[in-house]
Amino acid sequence: MRSVTPFDYGALDDIVEASTLGRDTMRDAIARHVPRSLGPLLEYAFIQPLHAARLPPVDTAFASGPASSLAETLATPGGHGPNRVGSLTSLRAEFSRIGSDATDADGYWTAFIKRLEHAALQAGFTNLCSKGLAGAFREMATNAVEHSLAPSSAIVGYRFEPNEFEYAVADAGVGVYESLRRSGHYPRIHDSVTALVSVLSGGHSRFGPATGRGTGFTTLLRSLTSLNGSLRFRSGDCAIEIDGRSPTLSCAQPRQRPHFQGFAVSITCRPK
Amino acid sequence: MRIAVRDLVGGDDVLGGSENGKRLLHRLSPLAQGGPLSEVLYLDFAGIDFVSGSFLNQSALGLRDYCRQREPNLYVVVANIGEKSVQEFEEVLRLRRDAAFVCGLDETGQAVDVKLVGMLDDAHLRTLDAVRRLGETDAVQLAKAHPEEKLEQTAWNNRLRSLANRGLVMESKRGRLKKYAAVLGGK
């Protein structure tokens, strides 16, 4: 019987790295993995087009409900109008094209965020924590609309199970480094690592420092105070992972990875 | 004057994102209409469980700055935000090197639990404290009451104007004189 392992970030990074090095054994390697969390799956879906010669599309790579649902959402045009939803009864998860309060005439986006908040409650978080997590999610989703320059490319998702809640946001926009570089406010930032660390530290965005802007990531970190969290931020050739209780930037581990066009973030947290 | 934010956000109780804050500001601006006398406009977040720094930056501080320009008799104070939201507000204010009052509102609509959050340098903090102690005052009185500061009247006026721009002291005219009183927490 073939062994099956969870498709986590370690597996994702190995597979993409191998593809970058020109290895052709990816399909077998991918088939041994089962998606359990949304973040690696979403990141795979966004990076796969750059490796189309060796990496199959997400629904072909992973014969599972989550992957099919994500593929369905990817195939849905973004922007205005009704957004289709992929629901995953087995994992209790949901993907969606990103919405906007500005164009939310039918209340779809507000309802999505309410379901996300409710999912955090069902995972075992307190009402106050769930509100904080939903607020931080709003910040990440708004970032994709405001900063990516490609809001229609963005996809969001959440997943819950007893004692674990996850949400993820990804876009195929300009990416963090390019966003800061184009602003002209950060002439000393020359790579994705310093760009990511700058925005994660708070107060930095394409609008420049000392404007009160760029606080979304610190809102996110505050929402995880007293919780156990695993975070991953991905943009350009950098991935930053933070693990632990009340995660902070001081625990961040930047790693060089193959290029990711745009930005992706995933947060997995546990109440205890 | 009091504006209930909950009535303007479609019943949403988690508010976040700069663009959403700007959208609220567009709804707030027409409602901010002052009269001939200086007064406090309480931006009441009762019923909102969480509001992010980004949202407050665009909505509350945006309204404050709008009032300074267009409705100079209105002084915006954020009311009834929870502890986590105060932390959010604190961060935004510190990044802007700015300060603001936050408070609760009792059943009669009076401010309770007044706090100054954000960043105020020592000179402006001393000035604010002096205004709060003296009640209504002016640059001439402050210069006489605090000779240790060794400031001329013009310098006191500059500090007072800076505090007024932050919505921390109210300015009113008595003939040719400008009088100042703390927006909250004064005599």
Image (cartoon, rainbow, N blue to C red):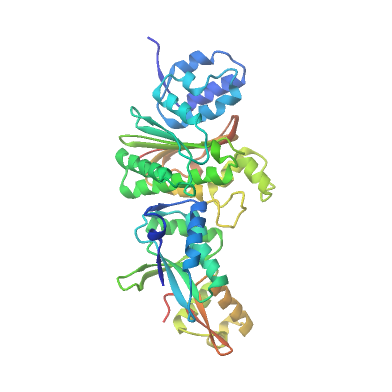
Q: In the image, residue A265 lies at what x, y percent?
A: 50, 38
Q: Quadrant of residue A117?
A: top left
Tell me: A161 left or right of A103.
left
Q: In the image, residue A245 lies at what x, y percent?
A: 40, 42
Residue B59 lies, with reference to residue A69, above or below; the image says: below
Q: Is there any visible trace of residue A39 in the rendered image?
A: yes
Q: Quadrant of the N terminus of chain B?
A: bottom left
Nearest to the observer: residue A248 or residue A105: A105
Name the residue rendered at 65%, 39% in the picture: A191
Q: In the image, residue B117 lies at what x, y percent?
A: 46, 65
Residue A26 lies, with reference to residue A10, above or below; the image says: above
Name the residue rendered at 42%, 38% in the picture: A167
Name the residue rendered at 33%, 27% in the picture: A90
Q: Is there any visible trace of residue A232 in the rendered image?
A: no
Tell me: B105 left or right of A25.
left
Q: In the image, residue A124 lies at what x, y percent?
A: 30, 40
Q: Quadrant of the C terminus of chain B?
A: bottom left
Residue B111 lies, with reference to residue A91, above or below; the image says: below
Name the residue rendered at 55%, 19% in the picture: A55
Q: Quadrant of residue B104?
A: bottom left
